[in-house]
Image (cartoon, helix red, strand yellow):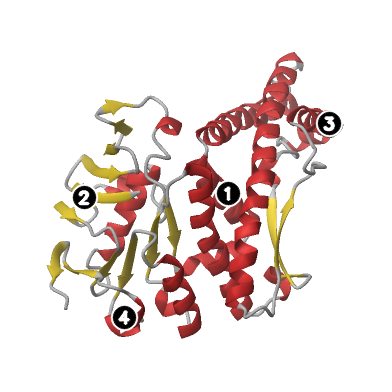
Amino acid sequence: MILQEMHLKHFRNYDELKVVFSPGINILIGENAQGKTNLLEAIHVLALTKSHRTSKDRELIQWKHKQAFLSGKVQKQVERVPLEIQLAQGGKRVKVNHLYQSRLSAYVGNLNVVLFAPEDLALVKGVPQVRRQFMNMEFGQMSSAYLYNVSHYHSLLQQRNQYLKQLRSGEQTDRVLLGVISDQLAQDGAAIVLARFRLLKQLEKWAQRLHEHISLQKEQLRLKYVTQLTIDEQTTRENLETQLRKLFDDNLEREIALGTTLAGPQRDDIHFIVNGQNVQHFGSQGQQRTTALAVKLAEIDLMKEQTGEYPLLLLDDVLSELDDDRQTHLLTAIQDKVQTFLTTTSLSGVARQLIKQPTIFKIVGGTLTKEETT
């Protein structure tokens, strides 16, 4: 898929911007605080309805305005899809093909993106929540059913935790409703765990090939899905539901005492294993960078496999964090295959010999100028 053009109004430091992009590599060059990362963020918001930098939509709207607008035209293999987002203090509204969508799960997936930023090293060495967010963001773009299950699960989880607190305080004494919520939670939780297990297996396949290539066949990567449930290739959703219900029953008294749910996919994790060791705890910084790069590049191939379309690749000042060999592997992997948006403060850090006919945009104070290249 290709983001052909985009229109922004009152977004961050862009009062208004209309831009036509190249289907190849788009280099966004500018000093810090000029708007290049804001433009990358706008593409991320247009794709996923949320920023990768803040959870507060109000921060995306120019301070003197009450609303921000984003729109774009996405060219897929068989259709051209207009997308629109209106951000306001009271919430957001989204359109696909000029029609409002009542559920975000009906919107997400029309424009898929893979983001690689310096902070993505946290995917390997950060806390488990980062890796759960990674699964939800990436797998949600591939499956609207997965995204819906995650959204519904978290809504039910909040209800269940609130009810547990009420049982603890004595505000509630009836456990029948808790059982109903727990049954629904087990259904959604089982679907999430099964989807994560299957998609991680597919992601591992692509990541192993890339990691082996980048490490010159010296290292082997495994992705280990860490869950409280017992699961393998033959495990059914019904079996996972049964396991979750049993965990809810077994943990109930402790959960009431703590006022929180102790089992479920909200406690899952991924372990990245290189040559038999968890790279989070025992890997060098170089191994952690190689693992993060392999996984990010694997996302591109997995999305193509699952959706039939390549995603956009957003590289937020990431080349400065990669040595020449890793830059070469990255740029070779995406050449002539993926529409790419790359931010940098200087072209001196970019392996220009690996980029064929880039389109360069210079950004100063929220103003975009397309530069002529030879």
Q: Closer to us: mark 2 or mark 3?
A: 2
Give the Cα distance between marks 4 and 1: 33 Å
- Decide if residue 125 is in sight here: no
Q: Which residue is mark 1?
A: 135
Q: Closer to us: mark 3 or mark 1?
A: 1
| Numbered disc 2: secondary structure | strand
**Residue 93 locus on image (x, y percent):** 31, 32
Q: Which residue is mark 2?
A: 5
| Numbered disc 1: secondary structure | helix
Left or right of 362 in this view: 108: right
Where residue 157 sits, quadrant-wise, is: top right
Q: Which residue is mark 4?
A: 352
The amino acid sitting under disc 2 is Glu
Left or right of 197 in this view: 59: left
| Numbered disc 4: secondary structure | helix
Give the Cα distance between marks 3 and 4: 62 Å
The amino acid sitting under disc 1 is Met
Q: Which residue is mark 3?
A: 253
